[in-house]
Amino acid sequence: MKKIYAVFIFIFLAISTCLFLGCQDAKFQINLPSEIVLQNEQTPLPELKLGDKKVSYDNFYYQNDDGYIYVFGNMIYLTQDAPDQFNTQLKVIYKKDTNISKTINIKKVHIEISSLSITCNTKAIFPGENVFYTINYLPQNAILRNYQVQFDHPEYVQSQDKNCFRLAGNVEFGAELTMTINVNQNLSATYKFVVNDNVYDVYNVNQLKRISNDIYGYYNIKSDIDFSDFDWNLIDEFYGVINGNNHKIMQIEYQKRLKDRQNNNNFGFIKNLYGTVRNVVFDNFNIFVHKFHDNLENMTIGSVCGLLINGEIDNVKIIDSTIYGYHDSDDKKVKTRLYIGGVAGQCKNGIISNCEIVNSKIWGATHINIEPSSIADCWTHAGGIVGDLEYGKVISCTRSDSTTVTSQVRSGSNTSAYHCICGGIVGHSYFGKILNCNSTIFNLKTIEDIEENRKANTSNTLVGAICAEVVE
């Protein structure tokens, strides 16, 4: 009899638990609209709630069987295969171990492009070098994927890639080249280039320092250059070409502790690189930056450049060097982010190829120290070649095992999210391409220095021999 009562009680408790959980699931419904209309290639996802309670986006999982969209963070993105207009279903799931979910309709409508233009870093181009350009169009919520690129002198063009072409090496100085982008019979844009003849030979430190006088020039380094007895002022921006001809730039040391607000938070031999650096050996290049401010977001640090935008770094070798960055803030609500790499801190739409880093140290840390009631994001993306890659390419690059890469986050506050990411070649890749690169997991390290009761609801602490985190 006792056994019968025990079985009955067990069944009763099981049914009660199921009903209770079902009620809980019904109570905490995902609060989202039934339909979202996409504005362009990326659209913010509305605030996510369970009932009236706000919940972090990272607590949700997403499914789309058509493969037209995906969700990362709080954004809905179109995939490369998505058609110009469509209707599809997105299933939003709260945690994997619950049955709380909601399916919503995602709609993309066709929007006609009304105007088109081309922008480029420079109108002056050089034989044998890559040229990067950007296609601009209105309205911005339209999508441009099908178009033709034409040149009035196709014999001047050696090769083409998306938003990039390489000028043939035998084109004469002073020659002109016009590029046309055709969308349809009624919509096109043109851009006129001139082959530059501003070529400078560089034999010593003083001649190298003159780069700032012509940031669109072509600089041929003809001998090794030693900075042992000289200081180097970082070049703010550069659009031309530096060809090292495999010579060394040696013994550069740059140390800064900054407390003031600056518009430029990028640090390297060149702060912002829009042009090309190739065939250079940086030997004993040591950069130490400690920046503190109460309202600072991104900071980038690399040996060649802090930020590479639509430019190129090719056949560069880093030896016996140190790249050190410490990003400090005490703002009440701030996203403190550091991108640090052996060659570049961050690469946007650029190309880094045939680069190598040997016997060097890369160390980056972000630190937030504010009152416990505050909320903050704390990110460190560190990579042997580049810390953060967005839509660019890293090709045939190598990090030796003798090169150490360390990514650290420190916080004395409550953190809503922190990313401590360390990659042998690339820290974090967002729609980038990493091809034929070599690195191992050896000497890659992450450090979380956050009090246990203040750790984030969502965090990424990732290490990867080639890349720690990939979004594509």
Image (tube, grey):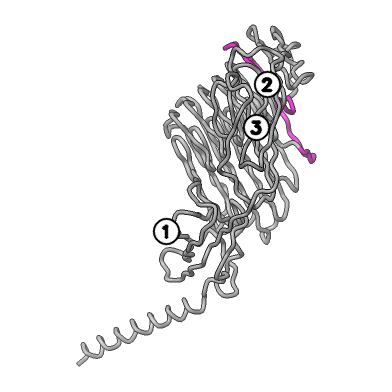
- The kind of residue on which mark 1 rests is Asp
Question: Does residue 415 appear left or right of residue 255 in this picture?
Answer: left
Q: Position of residue 294 (x, y in %)?
A: 75, 48
Q: CA distance from mark 3 to mark 2?
A: 16 Å
Q: Secondary structure at mark 2?
A: strand
* Figure check: 283 above or below 112: above
Q: Look at mark 3 in the image and give the residue it sits on.
A: 180
* Figure check: 383 above or below 178: below
Instruction: Looking at the image, tell me whether mark 3 or mark 1 is earlier in sequence order.
Output: 1
Could you say which disc has been placed on residue 125 in the image? Answer: 2
- Depth check, mark 3 against mark 1: the one in front is 3
Q: Position of residue 133 (x, y in %)?
A: 65, 32
Q: Secondary structure at mark 1?
A: loop
> Is disc 1 surrounded by few (<14), some (14 to 19) or many (20+) residues within 10 Å?
few
- The kind of residue on which mark 2 rests is Ile
At 79% from the left edge and 19% from the top edge, which residue is drawn?
213
- The kind of residue on which mark 3 rests is Thr
Q: Look at mark 1 in the image and give the residue it sits on.
A: 65
At 67% from the left edge and 19% from the top edge, which residue is drawn?
252
Q: Position of residue 192 (x, y in %)?
A: 71, 27
> Which residue range is magenta in the image?
235-263
Q: Position of residue 280 (x, y in %)?
A: 59, 16
Q: Secondary structure at mark 3?
A: strand
Instruction: Looking at the image, tell me whether mark 3 or mark 2 is earlier in sequence order.
Output: 2
